[in-house]
Amino acid sequence: MQWREAVAVGAWFLFALAYWGAIQKLSVVERAQSPVELLVSLPKSAQVLLAAGDRHLAANLSGFRVLVAATARMRPEDYAVQARLQQDVSWFNPAHEDNYYIAANILPWNGHLDAAQVVLRRASAARTNDWQPAFYLGFHYYHFLKDPAEGARWLLTAAPRATSQQDRWSLENLAAQWLERGYKTATAAAMVDAMAENAPVGAFRNYLKARATRLHDLVRLRELTTIFRERTGRSPAALEDLVTAGLIGRIPEDPLGEGFSLDREGMPVFKAPQAK
């Protein structure tokens, strides 16, 4: 038995020596940093299979990966994986609240606006009592795609879903402002008119009517400016030229207090709001 014990001790010693040598060699080797965030997105069928066929569980599992990711440390390729994951989650469970909120607030700012819009469109269709997915879609159209008209359309989709009257008014107010920027003035005036007619009687309805009135006044001033040019062969130097020419009795007052002016081409516009 002694020789067997001696062999065992010798083997153990050799193993320990080899292990120590390996540790010493590995300690000076630069190790690749394994990404700790979002490594890969599996096919949707595989995700459902791993969730025992439960689509909502698959949504929660993928959603958890997104939720715990430290976005400050993520690389562009990580965001690409996140975009795919969040679209998958929205396919498994389009009503997933955390998923649409994260998609709306992270993906567009990191180069994945299209993915965010897919998530938000699905959430807006599934969550018919939640105004926020449609609001975020509207903001994306306005801010990223520079399309205030489409942005306003989504705000008007969001407004009836708001449970607070104040939220509804805020959404409709913002939509009215975006309509002014996104449509021809006459079209915007007609749309704000329609919003006012559908609003409950009270201060907000009066406010919408005031916005519609100033749009109609601007349309009229532009029409008179065109007539002035046809008659004189020049643009008016000031809005008062329209009064002097007998085209209008007086320049209308802007019910919102900002007023009207002429742009560089001599066409009437709203005055820029005064900085406070």
Image: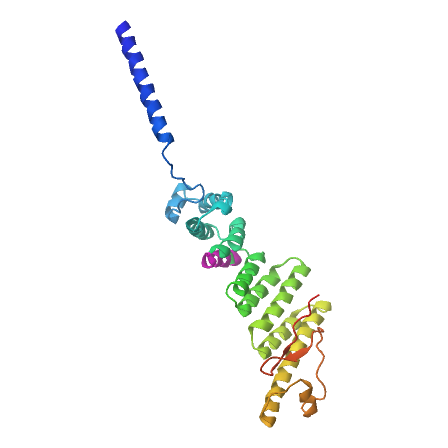
Q: In this view of the protein, can residue 177 be seen by the observer?
A: yes
Residue in view at x 55 percent, y 70 percent = 149
Q: Position of residue 177 (x, y in %)?
A: 62, 69
Q: Could you say which quadrant of the image residue 169 lies in?
A: bottom right
106 left or right, relative to 246: left
Which corner quadrant of the image does residue 62 belong to?
top left
Q: Is residue 226 magenta?
A: no
**Residues in magenta, as a range:** 111-124
The image quadrant where one finds the N terminus is: top left
At 60% from the left and 60% from the top, the residue drawn is: 161
Give the colouring mode of the picture. Answer: rainbow
Which quarter of the figure is the C terminus placed in? bottom right
Q: Residue furthest front?
A: 28
> How far across and down, in percent of the image, does residue 253 sit?
72, 79
Q: Predominant secondary structure in magenta? A: helix
- The part of the image, by quadrant, that contains residue 130 is bottom right
Res 202 seen here: no
Looking at this rendering, what residue extends furthest in the top direction?
2
**Is 118 a magenta residue?**
yes
**Where is 29 relative to 160, above or below?**
above
